[in-house]
Structure formats: C-alpha cells, structure tokens
Amino acid sequence: YDVSDFKSAAEVVKAIIQKYKRPPNILVNCAGIVRFTAVLEETPESFQRIIDINLKGTFFTSQAVCRELIAAKLPGSIVNVASMTGHRGFVVMSPYAASKTGIEAVTRCMSKDLSPHNIRVNDVQPGMIDTAMAASTAPEMVEAWVSQCATKRKGQPQEVAEMIVFLASERASYVNGAHVPVAAGF
C-alpha cells in the first residue's frame, strides 16, 4: 500500500473489513521518508514527496480508518510516528522536520475531533533509533545526536515499538492527544 496514493487508503480499509468482518480498531502510521538536502538545494518535487508520504499519508490513512470505525460505532486507537527532529532543528532536514512536526499538529487536532467517537490519537517522537533511516544519516549527525542523549547511544526499534503497543492498548485508555518522546532525554 502506497500511503501517498490517498484514494487507495479506503480500498485497503475495505479489504481489511472484507477479510476480518470489521474495520481495524488500531492504526499505527509509521510510513516515512527522509532526504538530506540543504535548504538552497531542495526541490519542490522532493519536498512534496516527503509531505505526501509522511504527513498526508498519516492524515488520509487515519481518515479512511476512522470513517469506518465511526460508521460501525466502534472505538479505536491511532498512534502516529512523529519525530524529535522538529523540536531541535537540524541541517539538511527541513522538509522532514516540517512533515513530522505537522504530524504532531494532526495528532493534537484529531484527538479532539475523534474523542467523541471513542477514538484516541497519540504520537510517539523517536530520537535517533538504530534503523535503516539512521544508517543513511551522516555519521557526524548521528554522533551529534547521540552525544546529547542521556544514554549516549542510539535507541532500538523495540523501544519505540513497546511505547506504540502501550499507547494503542486499553492500558492507555486515559491517554489522548499525547506526544511521547522516545529519545533518551534528547
């Protein structure tokens, strides 16, 4: 499923309903791309691609799932993957930071819009996590980031996943509109 193909989101949700006889009650929006480009070298096409996948993909996938949850009168939980990048600012990451900070705003607004329907919306804000995306980051950027973390290491994907599982679960039933850093005090 290509999250930048917004019309296909509804089709994917319909296929899930057909297979499982109900809409998904948990959605984790974790698709994301980054491109390391200096501000003066960024192109409109590249900027738009990052926004389409990271921000619009999150919004329209959530919209497709929530339409079905509301129609079925079912509760749900959405967990969006934002980033700490927008809070600190980094060189060559403006479009990525804008898209991920936009996800925070979407989370905040959707949590208010959807709470009357018993749908919670939260986000996690990973720091430098040991993923393929981190492997594509310049070593000096990784070192600078890690040096500012209390643990002096990159996080592990499992550490982010465990927070996502918690936020999606009923154990977090009183958590809505939260932005949870998973960044070792960065």
Image: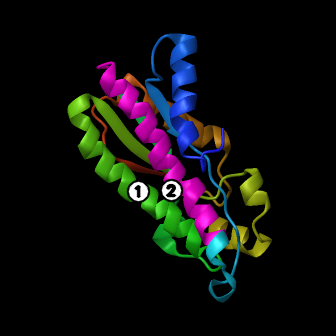
The quarter of the displayed image where residue 43 is located: bottom right
Within 10 Å of disc 2 (Cα), the crowding (few <14, some 14-19, many 20+) is many
Q: Residue at x 68, y 57 (%)?
A: 153
Q: Nearer the viewer, residue 154 or 115?
A: 115
Q: Nearer the viewer, residue 124 or 78?
A: 78
Q: Residue at x 20, y 33 (%)?
A: 116
Q: Which residues are magenta?
A: 46-75
Q: Position of residue 14 (x, y in %)?
A: 52, 24
Q: Position of residue 64 (x, y in %)?
A: 44, 36
Q: Nearer the viewer, residue 144 or 62?
A: 62
Q: CA distance from mark 1 to mark 2?
A: 10 Å
Any magenta on residue 99? no
User: Is any part of residue 82 visible from this angle?
Assistant: no
Residue where numbered disc 1 is placed: 104
- Tell me: residue 152, above or below residue 47: above
Within 10 Å of disc 1 (Cα), the crowding (few <14, some 14-19, many 20+) is many
Looking at the image, tell me whether mark 1 or mark 2 is earlier in sequence order: 2
Disc 2 element: helix
Residue where numbered disc 2 is placed: 55
Q: Residue at x 30, y 43 (%)?
A: 111
Disc 1 element: helix
Q: Residue at x 65, y 61 (%)?
A: 152
| Chief secondary structure of the magenta portion | helix
Q: Position of residue 162 (x, y in %)?
A: 55, 34
Q: Please, what is the three-letter code of the amino acid marked with disc 2?
A: Leu
Labels 1, 2: front one: 2
Outermost residue toward the bottom in this view? 40
The answer to whether mark 1 and mark 2 are in CB contact below 8 A is: no
Indicate how the structure is coloured in the image. Answer: rainbow
Q: Please, what is the three-letter code of the amino acid marked with disc 1?
A: Glu
